[in-house]
Amino acid sequence: MKRPRIILADAHTLLLDGLKKLIEPEFEVVGAFADGLNLVEAGPQLNPTAIVLDIGMPLMNGLSAGQELKKKLPLVKLVYISMNQDGDLAGEAFRLGASGFLLKQSAAWELVQALREVVRGGYYITPLMTKGMEGSFVQNFKRRRNSKLSLTLRQKEVLQLLAEGRSMKEVGFLLNVSLRTVAFHKYTIMDRLQINNNAELIEYAMRTVLLAA
């Protein structure tokens, strides 16, 4: 019997190596990618059964990459891993077609369990996640989707980099603007959209800005 074909995608090579060793006795790892853009371009040719991908990848974040992959591979199972223990972010991942969601601090055996579950058509979310995430996500997303607020190009650039996990200092360096300017854009966006914390800002960036780009 053929083993399910798995792709791994994460910016950290050591983590990719560790995940590969963890799942290979039961699954066949057919590819590994360090960014979302290469994953979208080359992943479909590997005919994967499931893809394990980090939400915070460079060039293209995991949610955007997952949405593109679902267009090319409607039957593929997506298992997201993240450092962000935010219920809204997990809710958005499932709304966009995820079959599993894990935290990077989850126990190692959970990935094997998650892959077993999704390969047979089920769903898996780590017990570490907060209960009731779906309700809060739906409420916040509907409010922002209907707000009809638009962002400037520079604000979108700031959001893109923040969603990739960059610090405000790094954003300023990459965009050649001062730290004060980056902070101004960030907090102006949060004020206009009634966003209260960084987790909500990242969720908004990934769904409303990055997926619409």
Image (spheres, rainbow, N blue to C red):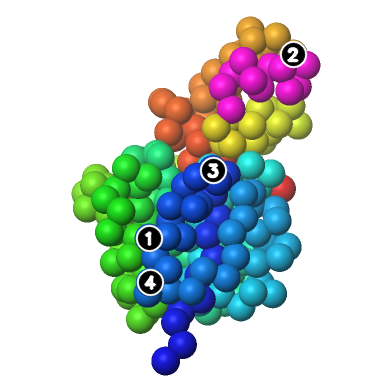
Element type where label 1 sits in the image: helix
What distance separates the C-alpha of mark 3 from that of mark 1? 16 Å
What distance separates the C-alpha of mark 4 from that of mark 3? 22 Å
Q: Which residue is mark 3?
A: 12
Could you say where residue 24 lies in the image, as x and y percent from the top left?
42, 68
Q: Amino acid at mark 4?
A: Pro
Identify the residue at horizontal 60%, vertical 65% (top origin): 31
For label 2, count other residues whose C-alpha is less than 10 Å away and answer few (under 14), some (14-19) or many (20+). few
Prevailing SS of the magenta stretch: helix
Quadrant position of the N terminus in the picture:
bottom left
Query: Quick one: 174 or 148, which is closer to the camera?
Result: 174
Q: Tell me where the magenta segment starts and ends, as one range.
A: 166-176
Query: Quick one: 12 or 40, which is closer to the camera?
Result: 12
What distance separates the C-alpha of mark 4 from that of mark 1? 7 Å
Residue 168 on the magenta span = yes
Identify the residue at horizontal 43%, vertical 56% (top origin): 19
What distance separates the C-alpha of mark 3 from that of mark 2? 28 Å
For label 4, count other residues whose C-alpha is less than 10 Å away and answer few (under 14), some (14-19) or many (20+). few
Element type where label 3 sits in the image: loop
Q: Which residue is mark 2?
A: 177
Could you say where residue 118 lies in the image, as x and y percent from the top left?
37, 73
Q: Is residue 80 above or below residue 139?
A: below
Residue 9 on the magenta span = no
Q: Which residue is mark 4?
A: 25
Circles 1 and 2: CB atoms closer than 8 Å: no
What distance separates the C-alpha of mark 1 from that of mark 2? 43 Å
Closer mark to the observer between disc 3 and disc 2: 3
